[in-house]
Amino acid sequence: MLSRWIDHAVHLVLLVCVVITLLTTVVVVALLGKESFLFFQQVPLWEFLFGTRWEPLLEPKSFGVLPLVVGTLKIVIGSIAIALPLGLLIATYLSEFASGRMRSAIKPVLEILAGIPTVVYGYFALTFVTPLIRTLFPDTQIFNAASAAIVVGIMILPMISSLCDDAFQALPNSLREGAYALGATQYEVAVQVILPSAAARVGAAVILALSRAIGETMAVTLAAGATPQMSLGFLESIQTMTAYIVQVSLGDIPADGIEYLTCYAVGLLLFVMTLIMNIIGNHFITKTHKLHS
Amino acid sequence: KELKGTVKVDGSSTVFPITEAVAEEFGMLKEHRRVRVTVGVSGTGGGFKKFLAGETDINDASRPIKQQEINKAQKNGIQYLELPVAYDGLSVVVNKANTWVDYLTVAELHKIWKPGSTVKTWKDIRPNWPDQKIQLYGPGTDSGTFDYFTETINGKSQASRSDFTKSEDDNVLVNGVAGDKGSLGYFGFAYYVENKDKIKVVPVKQGDNKPVAPTLTTINNGSYAPLSRPIFIYVNLHSAKKPEVREFIRFYLKHAKELAKEVGYVPLTDQEYQKYLDQFEHDFLKLAES
Amino acid sequence: MSEPLKDNNFSLETRNLSICYGEKQVVRQVNLSISSHQVTAVIGPSGCGKSTLLRTLNRMNDFIPNFSMEGEVLFQGKNLYEPSIDPGDIRQKIGMVFQRPNPFPKTIYKNVIWGPKIHGYKGNLQDLAEDALKRAALWDEVKDRLNDSALRLSGGQQQRLCIARAIAMNPEVILMDEPCSALDPGATARIEDLIQELRNNYTIVTVTHNMQQAARISDQTAFLYEGELVEYGATKKIFTQPEKKRTEDYITGRFG
Amino acid sequence: MSEPLKDNNFSLETRNLSICYGEKQVVRQVNLSISSHQVTAVIGPSGCGKSTLLRTLNRMNDFIPNFSMEGEVLFQGKNLYEPSIDPGDIRQKIGMVFQRPNPFPKTIYKNVIWGPKIHGYKGNLQDLAEDALKRAALWDEVKDRLNDSALRLSGGQQQRLCIARAIAMNPEVILMDEPCSALDPGATARIEDLIQELRNNYTIVTVTHNMQQAARISDQTAFLYEGELVEYGATKKIFTQPEKKRTEDYITGRFG
Amino acid sequence: MKRTQRKRKERLFLWLCRGATFLAVGILFILLFHVVREGIQWLDLQFLDNFPSRKPERAGIKSALVGSVWLIGLTALISIPLSIASAIYLEEYAPRNKWMRILEINLANLAAMPSILYGLLGLAIFVRYFDLDRSLWSGALTLSLLVLPVIVIAAKGAIRSVPNSIREGAYALGARRWQVVFFQVLPGALPGIMTGVILALSRAMGETAPLIMVGALSYIAFLPEGPSDPFTALPVQIFNWAARPQEDFHGLAAGGIIVLLILLLTLNAGAVFIRHKLQRYK
Ligand SMILES: Nc1ncnc2c1ncn2[C@@H]1O[C@H](COP(=O)(O)OP(=O)(O)OP(=O)(O)O)[C@@H](O)[C@H]1O
Ligand SMILES: Nc1ncnc2c1ncn2[C@@H]1O[C@H](COP(=O)(O)OP(=O)(O)OP(=O)(O)O)[C@@H](O)[C@H]1O
Ligand SMILES: [Mg+2]
Ligand SMILES: [Mg+2]
């Protein structure tokens, strides 16, 4: 009966581990919530959410978070616009065209891209990407959303290409054979059969990459500047939510004032945004799953 | 006898290079072998938070302590001493290709940087300057540099126009100014000194004085005004009861002169260092007696 | 049911076909002539090279890395492996149905029309789909849910869908590689019936390791053993008076 | 070959067994008595509940989320589903072999001894493995490469390894769920021979949808249809003079 | 006509795919080239063996390197068992119900949470609440929380990919659940788990912001002797150097990056090696 007893013990230990994981979330929410509460006692929620000027460190102060959200969205949209098509092409190459040896050589090489510290990307953007953009568009500001979005795109590229490659590889070969047996070209097989069949996992990869782009801090701080503003252009300076949090929490402003509390409010919003995105992603994935099985 | 123990320093990244240099020299002496000095960069505000909670012995500060922080200190019963350790001359710089600027007056700087400023081109500053678009560069709004600049030029700390290009990294500002023909920016003196070949510094004219450009001498003797600011360390006087902390402060004030210069800041005068050292000994003695 | 093989009736022919995977030879000098509008069954024990042989008939082997072959495969008198030939064209004319049903994860309708669509079919796709599904004896079961996912069909329905998919291309030959091995007896019976009907319009080559099935559905039977074509001829004859001892042994289940 | 069912010879019995998945009832009021040291075959069309029934006999259903059952399953007179019973013990005595061979990704040797080892077998493991492999008629083929990965064996060999793995536990009953359906005829024949040998020492229950196989290897046959036990009795009788019309129809292949 | 068009499209597509791949590899090489060109001249034994200094020629990364190794080691020790255990629980033990779905979404959300928030969390919980001060413990615990959900998700996937037939085979031999899990499922899932672990730890190694927030120091001229000691880490040191005005320090930063990359590559190579060894039964 010893092994039966062990079974119960193991069960218990494992349960404790899960509780710890759960606790993390609770503490994050509690912490962000508590400090944000103090903030929202002084700044009305609607002013925070819908205000269009984010100048908590200027006189007169203004607490509309939208410029930060717009800045964040620019990075997210820009980086995914680069990483998704490139990543899918690479994944297709690796999974459908490349030889086994080529694949196992290129994949880890690409994964190095994801391991490079993000500070490095920041400097790469400033010293390489921005000058490149400025030769094309001379009006570009030295800090600009485009350059930051490009390096963030490069950073999340291996994530998308690796995960999509895995997704493509996981599809049964019989699917490809079925298509080729109808006389399809490799292009048709890849784009019309493989890609849609792997849609759920591609979607999951994109969600993961998106959250990585949202959470990216250092590269964006360096390359995109620190100018929160509402605009549509990619060639001007912006500030993202994460960059703002770092700026404030490492800056010289007093640590107990309303200025400092802003970073918890922004953090809470960031948390809520990733949460909503994940729920949407999850919903979308289970839905496609259901259709396919 | 040999000292031993820990000296914990935290705070501004602006002051960090000086403190690092002091810590390095301090640690090289044989009698300090067993003293562990740690220096962090949580920012002046983050540093004060730890300092005022009694977690650190010394706080590097690129601005004077603020009222709310003073209140906190009183509440927590923390007694501290402010010690200026060097000057940072805020340098106003323009692009190398800018041939027209000879100097700027404080009033002109105010016109450019005041909240809601309408200055768009150089012509808007002085009518005989070209109709070249002006691009403004400055440090992030959370920084002590920004705080000081807005206070001296615009009369109120953190009051500034907001449509300028900001960055947390002064190196990046240097590149910005170097790359933009119509640019104007300000940042720490050290960054100007290291990049003299890339950018051009603008002399500043206060009142009826002659325009003065920032140099070691002009900052040191106070003639570069009003844009040179002191940077500080704050000492927890209770901590100073620990011999290793006391020794570290003494060492700091004795060697700050040469070390500050070495890392790109402008030292105070010998008399000033002596004055602060005396004040420290006095305040500390007073506390020790009570 | 079976007539003597007439030369002018051949749809597919292999000439001295030998196939290797890397160093290993798995098909040896096979000469096989497949008659039009008949059902030819290929039988033989596992690993004897049935699938390999079948795949060379519509160049589905192109995707196997270490594949190499000698000899010729003629389709309507032309060598399939000539450089000028586009394998896509070949596969359009010679369809294939696989061991496990492999519908695309799309709707039933899209499964059927995908092939014709990529080849730029000009006619009415709706009609085409209906026709193909009818011929595959699936129309009645799915006509109300053409826009459901094909993956929701049962195994047997999926396999018929795959046949419909092949038929929609209007091929001349349909190759089937053990089309019933993943199906239960009921579904198997339906597919067998279907093959009987399809023989009127198509040339069918089917691989099976179920001897009873070969006997039931085929006109010609080829017995392959260790890569060699041991015996080939009318099914009736092979199953009643095989010429070779080995064929007899296999058919009566003495080895396999 | 078959004797009349004697009460005292029963190894496993189900009493009014009904099984539901969620709301759906898939086994209805089945009373089945399985004789010791005989081979009992369960036949029936796909989806009639054969696997479901089999899994209740050694509680392998414990892992199916929406499973629920009524009635009793008796093993040596005791109800398998009493709370005091440890399913691990049950499965130790009632082994199982699955449709697709599922060797562990370990060496051949470790595959065989893993079960006895975790149950704290005291004897000589080497001898045990040899004995089990011999009984499973695999020893000669693998004796020189016991430390090779089991995954390198052929399908038929893998299935015999799985049988050896079950035998090594020295069970009283071996349940087999379509053990040959993934195998070619040659391998199938070997497994059938093996079952014939094993019947001397073990009670065997095997599911199959191959009627010929059931006829060849079993003493008793149970015919299940839509969850109901339509007919159960000596194999010879079922295949020659079935009592029910439905059984006859199924056996002669009129549906399925 | 139609067919040649399709063929042309196919060829174009192939070249696009190829082009994208080589573009990505090309970017990597440009990046590495940039870094190496700037940093290589600073790389020598002295650089590895010196403490930070205000004088570029005397400055080294000893404390940062040792700090990073400590940090990753501790993080691995804390997070790997915890996350693998959680993954096992979620895949093998937990009931599949609505709560578990919510838990899974929650996990995915934690994995996606910006690292800077973990910095805030670590500061409040470990540094302040548990009073661990600015020690390796605080840093490692914060990084552990950061990598935990990432590893859990990867490990869950790996465990799920072990075919069910293996579990059934084991249960059918009378094995208890823990025996099935630890002797059959886990060995089968290990290669996949390893990959997840390595990727997560590499990410942790390059994190800057959360470490600075929980108190990685910027100057420290001694080596930590235990997990309660203060520390600094490679990315923090790199960040610090890069922000200096003096040109030479930028070179040092590049040198530090090279060291960090070498460390990452070693870690990855180790993983590939282990994965290869584990996979011999596949
Ligand atoms: N891609 C491949 N590389 C190397 N050898 C292969 C490959 N595919 C098949 N073989 C080998 O070639 C031989 C013939 O295989 P084939 O699949 O044609 O047999 P089969 O008659 O279809 O068998 P089955 O009835 O099991 O499907 C076998 O020995 C097989 O192991
Ligand atoms: N886990 C499950 N949940 C819900 N329904 C199930 C589950 N497993 C099986 N069923 C259903 O229960 C019925 C009986 O299934 P079972 O697998 O026992 O049939 P079977 O006789 O073994 O069929 P086959 O010959 O195809 O293996 C089928 O209708 C099947 O769809
Ligand atoms: Mg085959
Ligand atoms: Mg079954």
Image (tube, coloured by chain):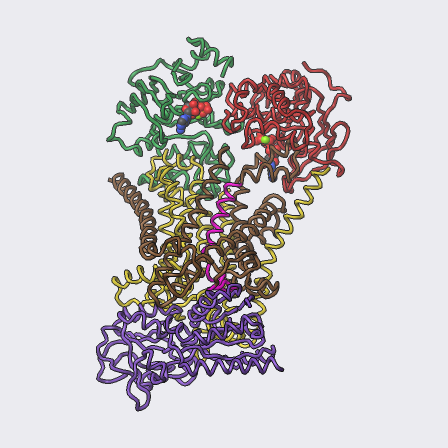
Chain colours: A yellow, B purple, C green, D red, E brown
Q: Quadrant of residue E52?
A: bottom left
At x 53%, y 61%, the residue is E230
Which of E9/E185 is in front? E185
Q: Is residue D202 magenta?
A: no
Q: Quadrant of residue E49?
A: bottom left
Residue D224 falls left or right of residue A154: right
Q: Is residue E206 magenta?
A: yes
Extreme residue in the front direction: B1
Report which quarter residue A235 is drawn in: bottom left
Q: Which residues are magenta?
A: E190-219
Residue A252 or residue B26, whichever sits in front: B26
Q: Position of residue A104 (x, y in %)?
A: 39, 40
Image location (x, y in percent) of residue A130: 31, 62
State which image quarter holds ligand 3.
Answer: top left
Residue D158 placed where, x, y %? 54, 26
Residue A282, horizontal then vertical, whole percent: 51, 52
Front in this rendered view, residue B62 or C81: B62
Does residue C189 show up?
A: no
